[in-house]
Image: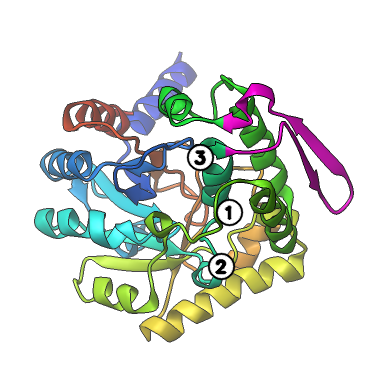
Amino acid sequence: MVQRFVSRARTLTARVQPHAVVLVYHRVVSVASDPWGLAVSPEHFSQQLRVLREQATPISMRRLSDELKRGRLTRRTVAVTFDDGYGDNLTGAMPALVEHGIPATIFIPTGIWHEPGGFWWDRLEQLVLHPGQLPEHVDLQFTDMLRTWDVGDMSCYSREAFELARGWRAWTAPENQRQQMYVELWRLLHECSSDERRSILGQLEAISSQEPHQLLSHSTLTEQQLLTMRASGLIEFGAHTVTHPSLARLSRTEQTNEIRSSKRTLEDILNQPVESFAYPFGRMTDYTSDTVALVRDASFTIACANVSGRTSASTDPLQLPRMHVDDWNGAEFAVRLAQWLRG
């Protein structure tokens, strides 16, 4: 009986233990298609921040790190983060963050500034899921194999077909051959080196009717824009590697270079310590215990994954879970936030 009482008391204590919720965004912009659900419209983002200000206590990642060090969290604490450093973090997110006085941390992959066309998944989306012409049989030569896709009557992807399919999400079943090809190519490119990705995308551009061009709507923040945002006093920047790889697929030496080089580059630009990090892609299969140790060795005090969950005083500060925010209006976001805060 006594043991049962003690066990129940511990359970009740765990339920009321203060916790934090870390939100993860990527983009604040209206887009034509969004297979991975990365974009929140500026209108909805502003509504979400209003809810956040009314229902929670928004704090910076630096303050969250301090609270975790003390083993004490403020109730209803929420931290806002952005992965990848898209340019619309300045044009779409920044005005609302300033209006509502809410701090945010943006995780920057420092090598993407020099990557033609921006992120590989955006280039892939443009070439495969947007209107244009491809051969009926798409042959792409990978380092160790030739892969072929039969897109059949989807070889000519019309504007009408694009409009009908634009709401599709990549974690649901493909509805046509183009979407099937996109999902399979995404998985393959996720495993590739940066050089091999460039080769595959170059081959795809060569057989596509689309003219190779930089996706200006998908551009990343420049060094000067980082300084402009930092001057607001609301924005912190964290490291997100150099080339945004799945770190689990790299050697220990390669991981060390990705982690330390991104930190060093950002510190040189900002002229201040960079203490937070986010694992690219952030799933449990995209980093390892060795990766976490390397992040700790690089003197990061806090790091974020992309697995759902809440942060408590017992959470490993180098593996914080985060809640992905979709393009919800304020009312829907309020429901989700209440659930997350309640547990």
Say which label, 1 or 2, has the lower sequence index. Answer: 2
Q: Is residue 12 left or right of residue 109?
A: left
**Residue 72 in view in this figure:** no
Tag 2 residue: 115
Say which label, 1 or 3, has the lower sequence index. Answer: 1
Quarter occupied by the C terminus = top left
- Asked if the residues shown at circle 1 and circle 2 are in contact, with their CB atoms under 8 angstroms apart, the answer is yes
Tag 3 residue: 307
Q: Residue at x 72, y 68 (%)?
A: 254
Say which label, 2 or 3, has the lower sequence index. Answer: 2
Q: Position of residue 259 (x, y in %)?
A: 59, 69
Element type at mark 2: loop
Q: Amino acid at mark 1?
A: Trp
Q: Residue at x 72, y 31 (%)?
A: 136
Circle 1: is it few (<14), some (14-19), or many (20+) Cα within 10 Å?
Answer: many
Circle 3: is it few (<14), some (14-19), or many (20+) Cα within 10 Å?
Answer: some
Spatial distance from mark 1 to mark 2, Cα to Cα? 9 Å
Q: Which residues are magenta?
A: 133-156
Q: Nearer the viewer, mark 2 or mark 3?
A: 2
Tag 1 residue: 120
For the residue pair 310 and 307, the one nearer the viewer reads as: 307
Spatial distance from mark 1 to mark 3, Cα to Cα? 22 Å
User: Magenta stretch containing residue 154, yes or no?
Assistant: yes
Q: Is residue 285 left or right of residue 298?
A: right
For the residue pair 177 and 110, the one nearer the viewer reads as: 177
Q: Amino acid at mark 3?
A: Val
Please say if 255 is above or below 42: below
